[in-house]
Amino acid sequence: MLSGMKPLASHPLLRATLVVLAFTACGDNKKNAAKHDGGIGGTPGDASVAVAACTPTSGSTVSFRKLAQSVVGGATLATSPPKDPRLFVIEQRGAIRIYDPGELLRPTPFLDISADNKGPVLAGGELGLLGLAFHPQYAQNGQFFVFYTSNNPVKGGDPYVDVLARYTASATDPSVADPASGTVLISISDPFSNHNGGMIEFGADGYLYIGTGDGGSAGDPNRNAQNPNALLGKFLRIDVDHPVTGKPYGIPANNPFAQGGGAPEVFMLGLRNPWRWSFDRGTGDLWIGDVGQDQTEELDVLLAGQQVGQNLGWSAYEGPNCCINATNQCDQVAPFQACSLAGKTFALDYRDHVKDGWNAIIGGQVYRGGCYPDLTGWYFYTDNGHGGLTKARRLDTGKLEIVDLPGTFPTSPSSLHADSRGELFLTDTGGNVFQLEAH
């Protein structure tokens, strides 16, 4: 809770929410129909979101419209608090900026924890401020969570740490956060500067999900991804509202190692660098763009209720290929991990570095907005090096219908994610922000 919290009717965050409710709704604002036993995936709480007025536009020819103002520190994600008309954009250097309705970029950052502002974020290359998620009750408690890289304060240890921290918005001004409110929840020692993951998002169960990279270098040299006791190369899941003794968070009872056999935070294993991923707000399905090694980019799709404890294969496999049998053995050195299909879940789309020209998949999101109804149910994704844009949707057969879209699209994309309305925004490494549109 915020210190000195005002009664809800007068709290500035709640007032901001009430402003949203005054906007004219457009499109389909039905509640999330998905039921999630065990609380897997989806949109937290009531998925009915009052949104700024738009005229629903027919058509499935997709383009991107660039917002007039850009951020300066390289944009890595655009997202929104629940039922909030503002768009929050992460700068890799360590700041969060706000676009108000009307796409006006506020000159003062919402939060700046960059090194140049004497903050903890270490940026450069694949390092920096990488993830942002707002608490489902953000309008009441002002809590939000960030994932960033920093220097390891432990002398003689690994040079880096991957950090999950909680902050709160100011109790008097909803346009800024309180930088002194930062509380570290998880700090993971990291030996290399690359493969840091960093995407975080709340599920319909109210738990916070965290994607971590395998620790970097090449070939998963520390064999983190298949080690259930390591927090690297994983999906983690924690309960931020009910801490337990010895931890500033709780462990969901149905986490696969909640009772032992591995780190209790681990939710899924076998990932290399799940840079961008998302839940489908309509179904709770989980779509993961897992960045590959030298040959294969992969898109994993896990249905709601079929996610707990899944093993996505790395580093025994890169994509569908056994590393032991690969020409370069996935850049690994002995001892190799045995390849067995048992207990592995494989991707539904693979992209080859040579044949397809992809080299760093950017997982996107299923469109659930109301402005472009012909896009509903399609998942959009891209690649940092290849660019372009692809859409996919899951068929009843379990396979994907995949369409590589014609057209010219932004280069060097870093994310493709939804705001509170379900409208999609693409960011690029140059600091530009684009809205996905259709006609």
Image (spheres, rainbow, N blue to C red):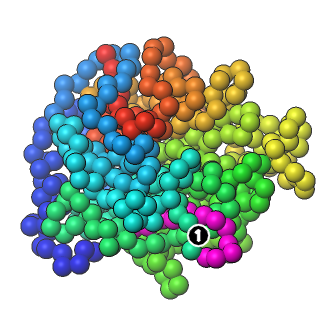
- Residue located at (34% from left, 59% from top): 112
Where does the image place residue 287, in percent across and percent down from the top left? 53, 41
Q: Three-letter amino acid code at disc 1? A: Asn
| Residue 37 vertical position relative to residue 253 in the rendered view, above or below | above
Relative to 9, 76 lies left or right: right
Q: Residue under circle 1?
A: 152
Relative to 5, 65 lies left or right: right
- The picture quadrant where one finds residue 321 is top right
- Residue located at (30% from left, 49% from top): 97
**Which of the image's four quarters has the N terminus?**
bottom left
| Viewer-closest of 114 and 22 | 114
Residue range of the region highlighted in magenta in the rendering:
154-166
Helix or strand or loop: what does disc 1 sit on? loop
One can see residue 368 in this view: no
| Residue 168 is covered by the magenta coloring | no
Q: Which residue appears farthest toward the bottom when viewing the image?
A: 245
- Residue located at (10% from left, 45% from top): 22
Relative to 25, 230 lies left or right: right
One can see residue 107 in this view: yes
Number of labelled discs? 1
Where does the image place residue 324, in percent across and percent down from the top left? 88, 43
